[in-house]
Amino acid sequence: MAQPFLTSKDDYVDRALQGFARSNGDVVTLHTDPTFIRAVAPDPRRRVGIVSGGGSWWHA
């Protein structure tokens, strides 16, 4: 029997960030505690981008 893509709402963000970092490992790296993704190498042409979460969006 196939397993569901997500087994728990608690690991949704962590797994999504892990997948993003794995698929873009040449340009980003994932850090934990606190969790964030950053560029591997600085680039003066790049602008700063921040995405922040923390609200309660999951409703069972």
Image (spheres, rainbow, N blue to C red):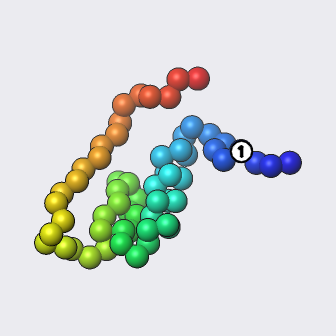
x and y, in percent, of residue 41 in the image: 26, 76
Does 16 sit above or below residue 56?
below
Quadrant of residue 39 within the rendered picture? bottom left
**Which x, y percent locates residue 19?**
52, 59
Q: Residue at x 29, y 46 (%)?
A: 51
Question: Where does residue 17 sit, x and y in percent of width and height?
Answer: 46, 55
Front-most of residues 48 and 37: 48
Element under label 1? Answer: loop
Taking 11 as reference, is 5 left or right? right
The residue to which callout 1 is attached is 4
Q: Residue at x 18, y 57 (%)?
A: 48
- Identify whether 12 is placed above or below 59: below
Q: Residue furthest left?
A: 44
The residue positioned farthest toward the top in the image shown = 60
The number of numbered discs placed on residues in the rendered structure image is 1
Q: Residue furthest front?
A: 45
- Residue in view at x 38 percent, y 54 percent: 35
Q: Classify the position of the C terminus by image quarter.
A: top right
**Left or right relative to 31: residue 44:** left
Task: From this view, report whether residue 13 is shown above or below residue 55.
Answer: below
Q: State the residue in front, 29 or 44.
A: 44
Query: Where residue 59 sits in the image (x, y, percent)?
Result: 53, 23
Q: Is residue 19 left or right of residue 47?
A: right
Type of the residue with mark 1: Pro
How busy is the neighbourhood of tag 1: few (under 14 within 10 Å), some, or many (20 plus)? few
